[in-house]
Amino acid sequence: MLGYNKIETFHATLLLIFSAALIWSVINPKDLFIWFLEVLPAIIGLVVIIFTYSRFRLTNLTYFLILVHMIILIIGGHYTYEKMPIFNWIRDTFHLSRNYYDRLGHFAQGFIPAILVREILLRQSTLKRSKLLSFIIISICLSISASYELIEWGVAEATGSAADAFLGTQGDVWDTQWDMFLALCGSIISLISMSNLHDNFLKKIK
């Protein structure tokens, strides 16, 4: 079990990594407006974490996963999702029809919130580990994904063509449905693969 000082150091390290990634991302991004749109959820998330840190401290696993999600957003903000270089290379090497970095982002949009929601419900509600809990978590993650799609739609309506890169459809008329489907898959896979590990982390804070 990590000592208090080690835990504080771990959290400070995560914050340092986030700060470095954010500073890197704002240096010559593809489009500053798109950068702002993409990284705004990560910045809001950081603010929430800071304000709740002393009152409701999450497990180290959850903080780490949140950082991973934030970095995915930050990288997407710097390059835009359809121009992320590594996934451009994957597209060209394997002769794919599009850059799939946004698909990774939406998979993470289900995978990572699933553990966050699971932790909040197990610690703050009377729900127990059960199929009902899993159903509620998956439903919440899917609603988060659907809400984000509505936000993207609203931004596109408000800004016109300037938000094309933010939508990142890359000509796919089913892009919105794919995004929600991948978030759904991410939440299910997360609960299957991470629940036991998450339980071990939860035991350390009780």
Image (tube, rainbow, N blue to C red):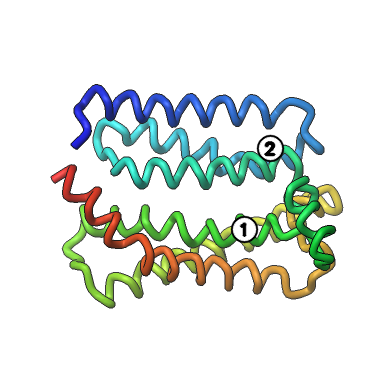
Could you tell whether 166 is left or right of 130 in the image?
A: right
Marks 2 and 1, Cα distance to the nearest angstrom?
20 Å
Secondary element type, mark 2: helix
**Residue at which label 1 appears:** 104
Which quarter of the picture shows residue 42? Answer: top right
Which residue is at 37% across, 69% downward?
A: 192
Quadrant location of residue 107?
A: bottom right
Front residue of 106 and 140: 106
Residue under label 2 = 36
Give how far across and how far down residue 79 sits, in percent. 76, 41
Residue at point 24%, 35% (across, down)? 55
**Badge 2: how crowded within 10 Å, few (<14), some, or many (20+)?**
some
Which residue is rendered at x = 56% and y = 44% of the image? 41
Quadrant (top left, top right, bottom left, bottom right) of the N terminus: top left
Which amino acid type corresponds to the residue marked 1 in the rendered image?
Answer: Leu
Tell me which numbered mark, 2 or 1, is placed earlier along the sequence: 2
